[in-house]
Image: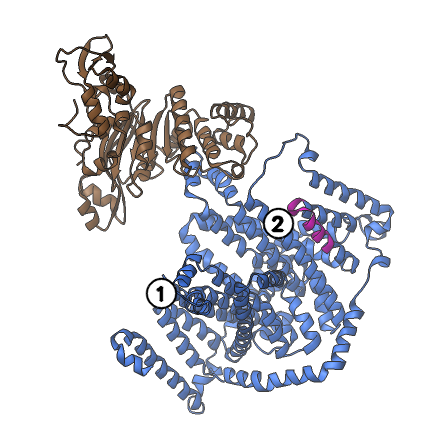
Chain colours: A brown, B blue
Amino acid sequence: MTDRTEQAPTQPGKDARPIKLACRNVWKLFGSNAANFIRERDGKASMADVTAAGLVGAVRAVDLEIRQGEIFIIMGLSGSGKSTLVRCMSRLVEPTHGKVEFEGKDLLKISDAALIELRRHRMGMVFQNFALLPHLNVLENIAFPLSIQGQDRPTREARAREVIELVGLRGREHFYPRELSGGQQQRVGIARSLATKPEIWFLDEPFSALDPLIRREMQDELMRLQTMLHKTIVFITHDFDEAIRLADRIAIMKDGEVIQIGTPEELVVNPATDYVAEFTRDVDRAKVISARSLMRACDGAEHGGTVAPDAKIASFSASIVSAGKPFAVVNGTGKPIGEVTPQAVIDLLAGIDRSRVGA
Amino acid sequence: MTVTAGASEAKARPVQIWLIVWASALAAVLVVFLLQDSLPWAVNYPASAIVPVADWVSALMRWIKSNLSWLTRSITAVLGVPLDFALNLLAKNFKIGHGADAYVLPRLSWVGVCAAAFLAGHAAGGRKLGMLVGGCFLYIALFGQWTSAMLTLALISIAVPFCIVTGLFAGIWAWRKPWAERLVVSPALDLMQTIPTFAYLIPMLLLFGNSPVSAMIATAIFATPPMVRATMLGLSRVPSEIDDFSEMAGCTARQKLWRVLLPSARPTLMVGVNQVIMLALNMVIIASMIGAGGLGYDVLLALRALKVGEAMEAGLAIVALAIALDRLSQAIAHKQAKGHVHREVSPSFWRRYPNLTLAIAILVITTLLGLFVPAFAAVPKAITFTTAPLWKAAVNWVTINFFDTIEAFRVALILNVLNPLRAFCEGFPWLGAVFLLGLAGYQLSGLQLAALVAALTAFCAVTGLWEKTMATVYLCGISAFIACLIGIPIGLMASRSDRFEKIVAPVIDTLQVLPSFCFIIPVVMLFRVGDVTAMIATVAFAVVPAIRYTNHGIRQVPPALIEAAKVSGCTPRQTFFRVQLPLALPEIMLGVNQTILMALAMIIICAMVGTRDLGQEVFIALSKADSGRGIVAGLAIAFIGIVADRLFNAWTAKARARLG
């Protein structure tokens, strides 16, 4: 199940980015004597073993690598262990077994002081229920992590005002959390986590407590921020549509295990299990699948236009169907590497699965 | 019973076994009861076998007194400084120098204090609260109780911060170290809250003498537990995400506690502060017996001289003070819970804190004016009035017109109910009680509870206090029974009618804040001293939780269940008896438990009106400064409370488990 977790190379360029955070066979078991249990088995145990030992496996044998600057989404239903996993990554929860590497260094081995230092300057986290301090106003809440570091008031308030500007909360500096709407509160949460200029940004179901319209708005806001800031983002959600919208890559979790990691397109095109397929079934495929996945070798027919390999089908479906001719898929230098036929696009839009599509 | 038992024998077997066990146990005890003459040692604990715990305690206290007097003296000296300052500031005057040429700095002017009280109320809860709080203080001033009330207030204002700080640190410790909570803090809190208030006074009297300082220490010990509990509760209730956030922000352990967790727990902590203030007030009144002075002392003096009018006046001043302090601290707690509201931040101090600045200004100005205008320094005699003659006249009128009725009622109660019950209780074999209570503990929870209950009960007998213990149990039991008989129906009615609840709620709120002393005064006026007075005062005092918990229990039944019952075609009557009442039962039992504990606390104080039980034992010990006797009697009372509490809790827990 877990053997096909590593990503199939889609774009050679993406993999060149350095690995920011990696989990190596991370386990979190609850129950008495859990550490011995997993050490004796050398980090290998089946679900049945765990249950037989009377333990609860919140996170089991998770291996994943998050690259600098990517939005990595961990998707799973409630109880799948996604929250525990992200807390293992930040060491809010101490993993029972395995390694969590931050820029190649094992996070589980560093001292408390080093961990505090790391969290103060290089990690940020946003919470589902905002976790704002009720006794501080917006400005003080946002400046709080800086004040913990011992920055003086003018410096930290200047920085807080910068991020307030960034998330569009100007004019609310002196409001207290309970005076703000949910969306505004989460903007404060986001601003607060950005105030320290973190390199890795954990977002634990940040929009799940918001109603759908606001959620959508906040997703756009996140994308806007990411185009400016280029953080490494670990984003937890139980909402597959949200994952598809935001992710560079998605890890799908079930019962504490990661069952597949891949780009949204890979998940949709090649779901590893029926469980994954169940999620991807209702996805609007034209928005996820790119020309590369749909193309075939050129057979010499006349082309009605050209598209980039990464272009989503939805972006040219109307023009290709009205043109009635295949489009050439061209790489960066303008050389055709294949073609997409109108029939293939129509099949995709209609949901007809004529032979397996894919590269 | 036998018919159904036959039908569902397999199912009912455990019940049946217990039925047989209880029947035979009761029969055995009955045999012992009837065969008193042949088994005297099982009925009355043999005097020769009494363990002289009291003597040991006395010896220990004597040793502490003679060997640790340097410590107690230095504690007195250190605590005396802030206390004297507060006493001088509020009630007496600052005297610098000695004798005739001493220079006198005046205390705070009563006009200023009333104005400050108004402003505090205004700041915390708007004009209405300001009027109430200011009005209470003005009432105290105009009815000539100013100096006494300020003495009481000064003691409270020093004891309360002490309690809050101690309680906070103890709570933090218990929260951080689960073993400390389990082994030290929880048992200590249980004991501190079940030991009767009187019993605190004796060791204090012995160690620190008859002075305001020892009264303050007794008050501080008595009033700290709610703060400890509130701290533990508040810290454990902080959402886990806020905890995670503080970790992710890189807080050190200290930063996390002081800058994140405690401020987030502030609403709960403020509820604790409110309780601390009310308990401190209650205790300061009682501690007047060991030199606290103030309103409590006035009541005490008046009661001893049977000056009903004066006692009533001082008692009403206590009520006014209690209401003012309670409503004020509740409004502040409420404000905390609602959260902050932003406003323009202004750089200048007086703009940011207009009420505080104004209050300080008024206090300073009126106090300075008091140097020249005596009316500001002390409440002028001309504008005070006294209601004492009025109360006296009222009592006289009642006595003259209704003496026969009241007396007939009293005598009938004593002859037909109280005395037979008392005789039964006092004659109850101690061995039988130990056995039966242990059996109940075993059935409800297990061997551990059985052992605890039996050991605590045996303590009362072994120390030679069996008869007085049973006298306490009898009076407490009948009072609690009557309180429940009155309280539960009222609670039921309140739960079924919003209008009735609106009437009941403020009444029980007020009853709850009144110091226990206040309940005795009006009853003594009508029924004079004795068991009947104690019983009536106790019923009035202990009825509150029965009403409150019953009402709350019925109202908290989930509406979905009631709707489900209605949809299934239940009549309102059926809904009530078959759905609401069974579901509310655990909560109601909790109320009964509270009622019993409160009744126990009150019965002890009623020793002042001449009951013959453990309270009297403590009272005598207090007047003789016999520490061993007092402490042992106090422990016996605490143990009665603990036994009742544990058995009830075990029962409630069982009922809850059954309801799921």
Q: Report helix, strand or loop for mark 2.
A: helix
Residue at (43% x, 79% y) in the render: B433
In the picture, measured across the screen, residue B404 lies left or right of residue B63, that is right
Disc 2 crowd rating (10 Å Cα; few below 14, some 14-19, many 20+) is many
Prevailing secondary structure of the magenta residues: helix
Residue at (68% x, 31% y) in the render: B348
Q: In which quarter of the image is residue B247?
A: top left
Residue B74 visible to an observer of this rendering: no
Looking at the rendering, the stretch of residues picked out in magenta corresponds to: B123-136
Look at the picture and state if B81 lies above or below A1: below
Q: CA separation, marks 2 and 1?
A: 39 Å
Question: Disc 2 designates what residue?
Answer: B331
The picture places residue A345, in percent across and down from the top left corner, at 21, 22
Q: In which quarter of the image is residue B451?
A: bottom left
The picture places residue A38, in percent across and down from the top left corner, at 21, 42
Q: In which quarter of the image is residue A349?
A: top left
Residue B635 visible to an observer of this rendering: yes
* Closer-to-camera residue (A96/B613): A96
Mark 2 vs 1, N-terminal side: 2
- Residue B126 within the segment the image draws in magenta: yes
The picture places residue B104, in percent across and down from the top left corner, at 81, 48
In the picture, measured across the screen, residue A80 lies left or right of residue A228, that is left
The numbered dot on residue B658 is 1
Pointer 2 indicates a residue of which chain?
B
* Closer-to-camera residue (A103/A299): A299
Residue at (48% x, 28% y) in the render: A146
